[in-house]
Image (cartoon, rainbow, N blue to C red):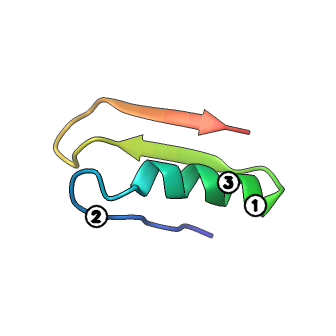
Amino acid sequence: MIIGISGHGAAGKTTFAHNLMEELKYGVNYLNTVHSEFINSKVHSN
């Protein structure tokens, strides 16, 4: 399953993503990209 979260500025996307990962209760991979044109990304696993 892939879930995309989008929104402008300080809309709470990262907070929502972290809360969602805690609720899912199983292995989750999280890719946080600042902007689609940037190569810099962070990948988190729980």
Residue at (83%, 55%) from the top-left corner?
A: 26
Q: Is residue 33 above or below residue 42?
A: below
Query: Which residue does the numbered mark 3 point to in the structure image?
Result: 21
Above or below 41: residue 3: below
Q: Amino acid at mark 3?
A: Met
Report the residue marked by disc 2. Answer: 7
User: Where is the N terminus found, in terms of image quarters?
Assistant: bottom right
Secondary structure found at label 2? loop
Q: On the image, numbered disc 1 is attached to which residue?
A: 23
Which residue is the extreme one toward the left?
37
Quadrant in which the C terminus is drawn: top right
Neighbourhood count class around disc 3 (C-alpha, 10 Å): few under 14, some 14–19, many 20 upward:
some
* Gap between marks 2 and 3 measured at Cα: 18 Å
Q: How many marks?
A: 3
Circles 1, 3 touching at the beta carbon (< 8 Å)? yes
Q: Are marks 1 and 2 in contact (CB under 8 Å)?
A: no
Residue drawn where x is 28% and y is 64% of the image? 7
Element assignment for label 3: helix
